[in-house]
Image (tube, coloured by chain):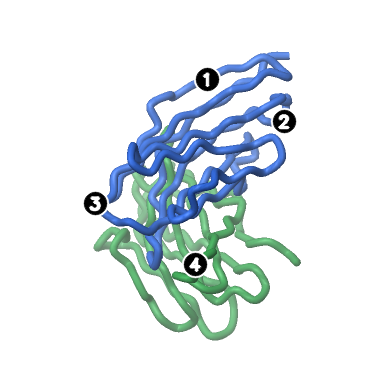
Amino acid sequence: NAGVMQNPRHLVRRRGQEARLRCSPMKGHSHVYWYRQLPEEGLKFMVYLQKENIIDESGMPKERFSAEFPKEGPSILRIQQVVRGDSAAYFCASSERPGYSSETQYFGPGTRLLVL
Amino acid sequence: AQTVTQSQPEMSVQEAETVTLSCTYDTSESDYYLFWYKQPPSRQMILVIRQEAYKQQNATENRFSVNFQKAAKSFSLKISDSQLGDAAMYFCAYRTYTGNQFYFGTGTSLTVIP
């Protein structure tokens, strides 16, 4: 059973460009979460999606950031007009049944975004 | 609001010895879950151990065990017989019973000395 897959693993963008980060959840999982880890910090929740629905985006910056999880294909985290402060590791996690008593989120390897 | 605090930015342990990493949290909930994740240099987040708040018995996974003190809102991780491969960043995390997101501490960097 393949784990959570993220690509690219490393992404370099210049200020003002767009960054697209992809996440394929574990097989059988239909719930995806995105987290951001700034240098020397813990992971911070950004958004939670189910197929074709955004359930909780309370951690998403109000501008330039968007996320989707289409019926077919991976979840995409999109950052428009990147700035240097967007440089971070972006982790995707997936779960099978959120809220279920024994639910655990499984993390992907992350995408390291560097904005020049 | 839920907060998770790891007061030890760095810890070190001799190989084969035991080390305890501290974690405290703040919540008004009575049912929740606590986790320890390991992040080695590869930066992959790996689940180490999980504890349900309603269980009094401390969770154990091989060389890893926790000391869960619900009243004190404390959740420490004990690593026995430390191995070189245990060197990593360790994050404590909290999730409400029906919540969608994890709340992470700032991490403890563990060094294992040969």
Mark 1 or mark 3, earlier in chain: 3
Which chain contains the residue that carries disc 1?
B
Q: In the image, are marks 3 and 4 on the same chain? A: no
> In the drawing, what numbered circle is on residue A92?
none
| Crowd class of label 2 (few under 14; some 14 to 19; many from 20; radius 10 Å) | few
Instruction: Name the residue beneath numbered marker 3.
Output: B1
Chain on which label 2 sits: B
Distance (Cα) linking label 1 and label 3:
28 Å
Question: Real-space Cα distance between discs 2 and 1?
Answer: 15 Å
Q: Which chain is the one coloured blue? A: B
Amino acid carrying label 1: it is: Met
| Picture residue at 49% right of the left edge, 67% below the top | A101
How many numbered marks does the figure carry?
A: 4
Residue type of the residue flagged with mark 2: Gly
Mark number, residue B11: 1
Residue identifier under label 2: B85
Q: Is residue A74 above or below residue B79?
A: below
